[in-house]
Amino acid sequence: MPRTFKRLAVSAIAALFALGGAVTVQAQARPLNVEIDHATRVQLRAPAGSVIVANPKIADVTVVDATTLFITGKGYGVTEIIAVDALGRPLFQSQVVVSAGSAGSVRVWRGAQATEMACASSCSPSVRAAPAP
C-alpha cells in the first residue's frame, strides 16, 4: 500500500508541474512602455479567452489571433492589461505606461497653451492636443 501511495504522489506532483507550465503568467517585471498613437506587439504562450484593459482611455488592445495582441497607446498615463485563458487563468499581466514620443514632434508654447507639432521637412499641427504640463 505505501508503494502505491508513493507512486500516486509522484504522479500527482508531475502532473501539477506539467499543468503549471501551460498556465504560467507572462508577468512583466518592468512596465511596458508604449508611445501615444503607437502599437506594441505581445505574443502569448497560450490562447487567450479574454483580455482586460483597466483604463481603455489610456491603452487599447487589438486581438489579431488567440495568441497575438497589439497594445496601442491612446492617452497619456498608466494602466494595466491582463490576458486570461478560457478558464480564467492569467496568461499575461503588465502595467502599461503611455507617454509622448519625441521623434518628429515639437511642442510650441504660446502663453499657457501648448500646440503639438508633427515635423518632417516642415512642421504641421498634430491631430492630438499636447498634454497638460
Image: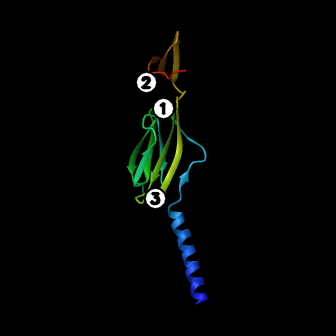
Q: Residue at coordinates 43% horizontally, 24% vertically from top-left?
A: 128
x and y percent of residue 129 in the render? Answer: 45, 21
Q: Looking at the picture, how far across and down is residue 8, in whole percent?
A: 55, 81
User: What is the three-letter code of the residue carrying label 1?
Assistant: Ile
Dot 3, crowdedness within 10 Å: few (<14), some or many (≥20)? some
| Disc 2 secondary structure class | loop
- Is residue 106 depicted above or below 101 in this figure? above
Location of mark 1 (residue): 36
User: Considering the numbered disc 3 on the image, is that residue within a helix, a strand or a loop?
Assistant: loop
Residue at (52%, 20%) from the top-left corner?
Answer: 106
Q: Which mark is residue 128?
A: 2
> For the residues marked 3 and 1, what is the alpha-carbon distance in whole angstroms?
28 Å
**Residue named by callout 3:** 46
In this view, the residue in front, 117 or 33, is 33
Q: Quarter-wise, where is residue 86 in the image?
A: bottom left
**Whole-number angstrom distance, CA of label 2 to CA of label 1:** 9 Å
Residue drawn at x 43%, y 50% as measured from the top left? 68
Above or below: residue 113 compared with residue 74: above
Q: Which mark is residue 118?
A: none
Which of marks 3 and 2 precedes in the sequence?
Answer: 3
Tag 2 and tag 1, C-beta contact below 8 Å: yes
Q: Quadrant of the N terminus?
A: bottom right
Given the current orientation, which residue lies at the most extreme bottom position?
1
Indicate whether 25 appears above or below 110: below
Q: Position of residue 48 (x, y in %)?
A: 42, 55
Picture quarter with the C terminus = top right
Q: Amino acid at mark 2?
A: Arg
